[in-house]
Amino acid sequence: MAKLATDNPELLIYIDGKLHITVLGGIKLKGLDRLKVTLKITLPPLGKCQQCRCQIIR
């Protein structure tokens, strides 16, 4: 079952089975016409971790 942890607004964590996705630094709600986030994607059983920066511009 998928779970989204939002206890800390600066560290959003989404867990769906073996996949963990973390939004580092949170999401700023001001100026949503442009969105930049840093994602940390982890597959815990394999110990693999990948970080990427995403930018979405409307």
Image (spheres, rainbow, N blue to C red):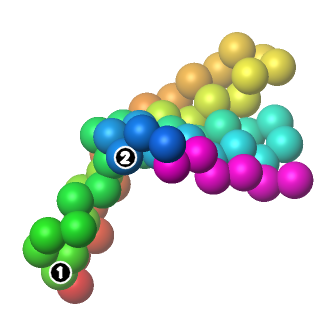
Residue type, label 1: Asp
Q: Is residue 17 located in the magenta-colored stretch of the structure?
A: no
| Residue 32 makes an appearance in the image | yes
Q: Is residue 3 located in the magenta-colored stretch of the structure?
A: yes
> Marks 1 and 2, how far apart in space?
20 Å
Tell me what residue is drawn at x 59 percent, y 46 percent. Answer: 5
Residue ID for mark 1:
33
Question: SS at mark 1?
Answer: loop
Q: Judge whether 43 appears above or below 35 on screen.
A: above
Task: Kindly give the residue lying farthest to the left in the view shown.
Answer: 31
Residue 12 place in picture, x, y as percent: 47, 45
- Say which of 48 and 9 sits in front: 9
Residue ID for mark 2:
9
Tell me what residue is drawn at x 57 percent, y 24 percent. Answer: 49
Tell me what residue is drawn at x 17 percent, y 80 percent. Answer: 33
Q: Is residue 51 left or right of residue 57?
A: right
Magenta range is: 1-6
Residue type, label 2: Pro
Task: Kindly give the residue lying farthest to the top in the view shown.
Answer: 47
